[in-house]
Amino acid sequence: MSFINARILALVGLILFSSLTQANDDVSLRGFYSYESNGADYFSSVGVGTTFKDSETNLGIQVNTSIGYAEVIAQDGYLEDFVSWEAGVRFGYFSNLSVYIEGGIDLSELFFHDLRYDEYEHENGYEDDLDAYVGAGVGFRTGVLQIDGFVRMREIDSKYWEAESEAFSGVQISLNF
């Protein structure tokens, strides 16, 4: 089974699992739009996530995946743009008011890294770090609508360049089901 088919199957499974557990308040599904920036640098993405929490304490985790587009200025001054497929996990308190810490990675770099560079570059030791982020955020939920504000520290690079900015702040708008 190809990586693309496996990811589609996993996403469909996540949606089905979440819809089957809707009677349980401890598990919920959501779709979201996220925008974060630092000056002219920005990330814009759409995604889905599932929240698993304890109904008595509201402590839990959120598992998220998103597809996004980014434009960042590299340390050499050039504008770099790319598409990212990210996965992240949030740990925190999830209720009408949410507070969390988070971390995530760029799955496209994880799964397709070998497609990005030719054999010569691998044989001669050219490597770049896996793009990743850590952050913290707060959110307010009213009915099905939730708005989160967050800050993230990002590792963004490729073999040829590294982003000038690492700190981003943003907003996420979610519809919860």
Image (tube, rainbow, N blue to C red):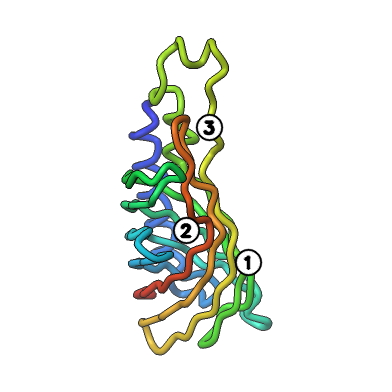
Label 3 vs 2, first from the N-terminus: 2
| Amino acid type, residue under disc 1 in the picture | Phe
Residue at the extreme right of the image, as rendered: 57
Local secondary structure at mark 3:
loop
Q: Amino acid at mark 3?
A: Asp
Name the residue beneath numbered marker 2: 64
Residue 10 found in image quarter: top left
Residue at which label 3 appears: 128
Residue drawn 47% across the image and 69% down it: 169
Label 1 – label 2 distance at C-alpha: 12 Å
Q: Is residue 158 left or right of residue 42?
A: right
Badge 2 element: strand
The x, y position of residue 91, in whole percent, is 63, 66
Please tell me how crowded label 2 is: few (under 14), some (14-19), or many (20+) other residues with Cα within 10 Å. many
Image position of 100 with respect to 67: above or below:
below
Position of residue 16 measured from the top left corner of the image (x, y, whole percent): 38, 56
- Can you tell which of label 3 and label 2 is closer to the viewer? 3
Which residue is drawn at the image coordinates 33% and 67% (left, top)? 33
Task: Tell me the distance, in whole angstroms, between the alpha carbons under discs 1 and 3.
Answer: 28 Å
Give the SS element for disc 1.
strand
Seen from the viewer's position, the closer of residues 139 and 1 is 139
Q: Amino acid at mark 2?
A: Asn
Asked if one can make out residue 77 in the rendered structure from this viewpoint, the answer is yes
Residue 177 in sight here: no
Q: Residue drawn 38% across and 49% down?
A: 11
Label of residue 91 in the image: 1
Q: Mark 1 against mark 3, which lies toward the viewer?
A: 3
Q: Nearer the viewer, residue 41 or 48?
A: 41
